[in-house]
Amino acid sequence: MPQLSAIVITRNEAGNIGACLDTLAFCDEIIVVDCGSDDATADIARQRGARVEQHEWRGFGPQKNYALSLATGSWVLTIDADERVSSELAGAIKNAIAEDSADGWEFPRLSSFCGRPMRHSGWYPDYVLRLFRRGMAAFDDVIVHERVICRGKVKRLRQPLIHHPVLKLEDALSRMDRYSTASATALVASGRKVSFMTGIGHGLFSFLRTYVLRAGFLDGAEGFLLSVANAEGSYYRYMKVWLATRQPR
């Protein structure tokens, strides 16, 4: 039986998946669950030795739980296509499994924005639970911003997971649109009512929180760009809810 299974979900990640899977070569099993990519994502993953399965998209949580259901290792490492496991983190992961002192492990995540590692702006250390004993954890069943729920003891590693979510400003705009739509859909489904001013207020607060309260100004020009992108994402999330739920005239 494999000791460590890595799971990745994808859709049109041809530009990312190869580099991602190259950093997972230390794992005993790699599973990629794709949802209808029309680029070379699946082919690249197979070339890297991954098992590739197709599955209809129902949200991040359900998709990752399906990937988890395919894993056979005693331990599971969950990684996104735009993340990379450094050799130092790979060594720490192997030591953590051998140590066997916890059921789940969190990593600090160092994310970059338009080429700059962001050590402020609320983006670091950004601990994420990504390694866990199979059978002791699962993803919550949400459409977006899913997280791992572990029923056992959780400890932390100090080596960071490298994250490249935004390579250029166009990526930030596309990401903002996708995530604001997904979040708005969830809010509409919950029955929450918002006013026109809700979006304005949340957008302004999001900028101040990122740039001032979380010291985004220390991340230079990229910190300002990120603060604006966060504000736009919050603004459009609530405006999309308002437009979807307002009473017809």
Image (spheres, helix red, strand yellow):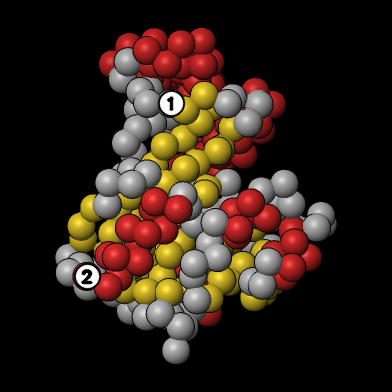
- Measured as percent of width and height from the top left, residue 162 is found at 47, 43
10 Å neighbourhood of mark 1: few (<14), some, or many (≥20)? many
Let me know if residue 236 appears in the view. Answer: no
Residue type at mark 2 is Glu
Position of 65 with respect to 124 (left or right) is: right
Quarter the N terminus occupies: bottom left
Q: Which residue is mark 2?
A: 99
Tag 2 secondary structure: helix
Specify the label residue 136 is tagged with.
Answer: none
* Labels 1 & 2 near each other (Cβ < 8 A): no
- Measured as percent of width and height from the top left, residue 102 is found at 20, 67
Name which residue lies at 32% across and 15% down: 215
Let me know if residue 89 appears in the view. Answer: yes
Name which residue lies at 37% across and 59% down: 91
Q: Earlier in the sequence, mark 1 or mark 2?
A: 2
**Between residues 158 and 121, which one lies in front from this camera angle?**
158
Q: Which residue is mark 1?
A: 118
Name which residue lies at 58% across and 71% down: 31
